[in-house]
Amino acid sequence: MTHFIAKASFAALIALASIPFGTPTASASGWRHEPAVNVQYRPAYACSPGQAVQKARWTGLRYARLTNVTPRRVVVSGRNYRGWDQMVFANVRGCPLIRR
């Protein structure tokens, strides 16, 4: 019986000793960052429509204009040497070309 009481008191002592060490680490950072008011947030991982149009122009699409934007793709239409054409870019960072 004395071994049980000794082990239980030792476990309680360890449990009580670990409580004060857990709370300061969770709230150690007193600095709080609050975003500026009236700032439009655009994720850095998305393809901007201007970047997609610029890439289409660099690849030879003239009169390039934005046609459609979805969460997955950005469609740019324009003319090339054969006629009207579309370029489809993925809506991720870097605007990789999906289909021409």
Image (cartoon, rainbow, N blue to C red):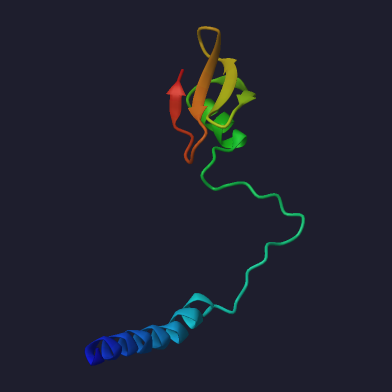
The quarter of the picture where residue 64 lies is: top right
Q: Is residue 85 above or below residue 52?
A: above
Number of disc labels: 0
Q: Residue at x 54, y 77 (%)?
A: 27
Which quadrant does the N terminus fall into?
bottom left
| Residue 54: x %, y % from top left | 56, 32
Q: In x, y percent, where is residue 57? A: 54, 27
- Residue 49 horizontal side relative to residue 94, left or right: right
Farthest front residue in view: 1
Q: Image height check: is 56 above or below 20?
A: above
- Name, please, the residue furthest toward the top: 82
The one nearer the camera, 42 or 14, is 14
11 sits left or right of 55 in the view = left
**Residue 68 position in % (x across, y down):** 62, 23
Q: Residue at x 51, y 44 (%)?
A: 45
**Residue at horizontal 58%, vertical 47%?**
43
- Picture quadrant of residue 39: bottom right
**Residue sitting at 44 percent across and 24 percent down?**
98
- Determine whether, in the image, residue 14 is placed left or right of residue 56: left
Q: Residue furthest right?
A: 38
Does residue 39 lie above or below 84 as drawn?
below
The percent coordinates of residue 92 (x first, y second) are 49, 37
